[in-house]
Image (cartoon, rainbow, N blue to C red):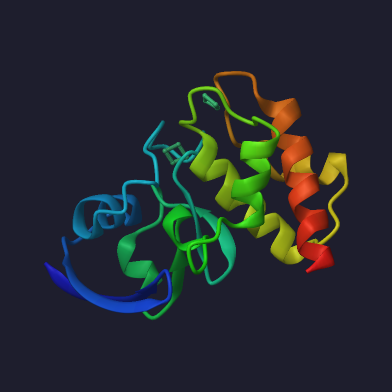
Amino acid sequence: MAKLTFTINGTRRTLDAAAGARLIDVLRDGLGLTGTKPGCREGTCGSCTVLVDGRAMRSCITPAASVAGKRVTTIEGLATAGKLHPLQQAFLDYEAYQCGYCTPGMIVGAAGLIARNASPGEQAVRQALDGHICRCGSQPRIVQAVRAAAEVMRRG
Ligand code: FES
Ligand code: FES
């Protein structure tokens, strides 16, 4: 075990993490943030995506120790003051999910995209979410929802 300090959803936390622990396990088991979903656990499905210092990362292949001193944002950290993040609202409005298992990773991945491209075209969204697998086939509505959310965020 080693002490790990990082900022999670705006709050600085220190906790014990096993040597070699993956970020996803620290989030889910150590902090109870189960919105980050385990899928393949090999870095290929995107369901475990979180933001590390604003960049989308696969938490299943991210060593927990590597986020020491950094800012991690999970799906639980996107809503502010009881108000859904525009991406969360757009996913609801466009019904961009069926089972919802891929949804947290999709939304967090999209947040990472919009942070670096405020006006993503369809291709940019498809490219950014290419590595996110939706087993329910909701991709067309997901792309619409991400573009609609980006527009809402541009308008402020
Ligand atoms: S669980 Fe992390 S990419 Fe699939
Ligand atoms: S909504 Fe079911 S996996 Fe995407």
Q: Residue at x 16, y 60 (%)?
A: 18
* Ligand 1 quarter of the rendering: top left
| Left or right, residue 92 beside residue 46 | right
Does residue 46 show up? Answer: no
Q: Is residue 137 above or below residue 27?
A: above
Q: Residue at x 38, y 68 (%)?
A: 66
Looking at the image, which is closer to me, 53 or 21?
53
Could you tell me residue 116's position as x and y percent?
Answer: 74, 65
Q: Is residue 75 above or below residue 154?
A: above
The quarter holding residue 56 reads bottom right
Could you tell me residue 21's position as x and y percent?
Answer: 24, 56
| Left or right, residue 32 beside residue 139 | left
**Quadrant holding the N terminus:** bottom left
| Left or right, residue 50 beside residue 66 | right
Does residue 87 show up? Answer: yes
**Quadrant holding the C terminus:** bottom right
| Left or right, residue 144 beside residue 22 | right
Q: Residue at x 39, y 70 (%)?
A: 67
Could you tell me residue 130's position as x and y percent?
Answer: 68, 36
Residue that protrudes farthest toward the top in the picture: 136
Looking at the image, which is closer to me, 65 or 146?
146
Q: Residue at x 57, y 18 (%)?
A: 136
Q: Is residue 73 above or below residue 87?
A: below
